[in-house]
Amino acid sequence: MIEFTNELSTDEDGIENLLDLVFSASRMNLSSYSLRKKVPKVKTLCYVAKNTDGSIIGVIRCWPIFIGKKKKISLLIGPIAIHPTFQGEGLGAYLINHLKKVSKKYGWKRAILIGDIDYYKSFGFFQQNENKIDFPPPTDSKRILLLELENNSFKDVEGKVVKFY
Ligand SMILES: CC(C)(COP(=O)(O)OP(=O)(O)OC[C@H]1O[C@@H](n2cnc3c(N)ncnc32)[C@H](O)[C@@H]1OP(=O)(O)O)[C@@H](O)C(=O)NCCC(=O)NCCS
């Protein structure tokens, strides 16, 4: 049976192996990684899916980020990865829906994710109309997806996304 739990420090190696498999090691060059470097994860919002033998077959992680001069805090959701053998079985959807529920409970108002709108729109993610939010390069603006965890929480939020400190 597949088990979903909060990420533990002992899961680190299994998660890195899964991310290397799904995204390749060049993932470290992605713009999102620059926002995560030396910033602590939001531990309460990092989950893994484990197979019966304890191996990690799914992960979702979150970091905090600031947006714009007003330093509006937001979640940066990702990476999300499901082991290829287990893709298409609803594990990704389960992790995203669980994360949405718990992040609201903890009072998070908004989230950004870099990904395919075709997959993420069914969870409420949307593309920004006026490109008011600048993500560090190189990022395809169509892949900058916003999620309101509280209604209208992206209203008047604009500017550069920077590291949380
Ligand atoms: C994207 C990912 C997290 C989805 O998790 P999953 O458990 O495989 O997805 P689910 O079972 O919840 O949903 C499967 C459905 O999403 C669709 N889907 C998956 N990736 C998609 C994409 N990039 N665009 C559009 N649809 C997509 C599948 O075709 C499937 O559709 P169906 O139900 O009509 O057959 C997973 O496939 C994965 O790890 N992919 C590679 C890494 C990645 O792209 N991560 C996200 C960027 S951070």
Image (cartoon, rainbow, N blue to C red):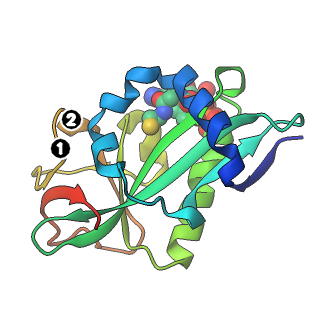
The residue located at (34%, 41%) in the rendering is: 33
The residue located at (90%, 40%) in the rendering is: 1
State which quadrant residue 88 falls in. top right
Q: Determine if residue 90 is in view.
A: no
Q: Where residue 38 sits: x, y (%)?
A: 37, 53
In terms of image quarters, where does ligand 1 lie? top right
Q: Where residue 135 sits: x, y (%)?
A: 19, 47
- Image: 129 above or below 67: above
Residue on which disc 1 sits: 136
**Closer to the camera in the image, 122 or 113:** 113
- Image: 15 above or below 38: above
Q: Where residue 131 sits: x, y (%)?
A: 11, 49
Q: Is residue 12 left or right of residue 133?
A: right
The residue located at (43%, 73%) in the rendering is: 108
The residue located at (65%, 27%) in the rendering is: 83
Residue on which disc 2 sits: 139
State which quadrant residue 58 falls in. top right
Check contact, mark 1 vs mark 2: CB within 8 A: yes
**Mark sitting on residue 79:** none
Neighbor class of circle 2 (other Cα within 10 Å; few <14, some 14-19, many 20+) is some
Q: Amino acid at mark 2?
A: Thr
The quadrant of the picture occupied by the C terminus is bottom left
